[in-house]
Image: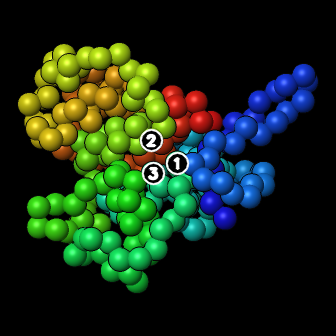
Amino acid sequence: MRHVPTQIVAIDGKNFAKIHSLTNSTYFVVQDPQNFKDVVTHWAKDIVNEMASRKVINGVGDDLFNPNQEITRAEFAAIIVRGLGLKLESGTTSFTDVKVSDWYNDAVQTAYSYKLINGFEDGAFHPTDKITREQAMSIIAKAMVITDLKTKLPAKEASELLSIYTDANEASGWAKSGIADSLQAGIITGRSGNVLAPQAFITRAEVAAIIQRLLQQSDLI
């Protein structure tokens, strides 16, 4: 069982599940509300609980989510794959540090197959490294191509979109296009005011919000 982006729409006074899937499969509607004890007063409470109810994100046990814990590259790959409802692909990836026995192997393989992720120059993926904001934005921008959100954006130069941030020069050259797309789509914003913080790590709560915005802006949920 895996999540598929779904909207509940009302037609002639009746509710229907509108399913957005990239594959031809068998579907059923599941209601499984989640309420984590450690997000009760957190800014992302509703977001985290909704995305967990949709089976996009998971808790850490004992009804806890650890919203402020920073997330790894492998975890982010798994969440973006679940969020988009992609069917997991098994097999060996082309990354030297991802083994078939690793829990994240299928998710990484699927993300790579859909061209959502890249490795490093040494042929590794560094799955247990914490993911940076610019790395996450680059992946989100590639997901926007799959959801057709990219085509809805007006043409703008990355330099124009990044110019308002005082630390835009800290962004890697390869990441600037993806950062600009994510910002323009309203999926990711600056950390505070005009600070982009491209090299900073992101938390589990922030990732839940990012994925929710991606799916909402793409009209998938």
Q: Which residue is mark 3?
A: 80
User: Label 3: few (<14), some or many (≥20) within 10 Å?
Assistant: many
The residue at the point 85 percent across, 25 percent down is 11
**Residue 160 x, y percent position in the rendering:** 19, 16
Image quarter of residue 32: bottom right
Q: Which residue is mark 1?
A: 84
Label pair 2/1, CB-CB below 8 angstroms? yes
The residue at the point 22 percent across, 32 percent down is 177
| Secondary element at image label 2 | helix
State left or right for residue 39 relative to residue 141: right
State left or right for residue 85 relative to residue 93: right
Tell me which amino acid carries mark 1: Leu
The residue at the point 35 percent across, 77 percent down is 92
The residue closer to the viewer here, 100 or 162, is 100
Q: Which residue is mark 2?
A: 146
User: Label 2: few (<14), some or many (≥20) within 10 Å?
Assistant: some
Q: Is residue 35 visible?
A: no
Quadrant the N terminus occupies: bottom right
Label pair 1/3, CB-CB below 8 angstroms? yes
User: Label 1: few (<14), some or many (≥20) within 10 Å?
Assistant: many
Earlier in the chain: of badge 3 and badge 2, it is 3
| Secondary element at image label 3 | helix
**Residue 72 x, y percent position in the rendering:** 33, 60
Q: Nearer the viewer, mark 3 or mark 2?
A: 2
Q: Nearer the viewer, mark 2 or mark 1?
A: 2
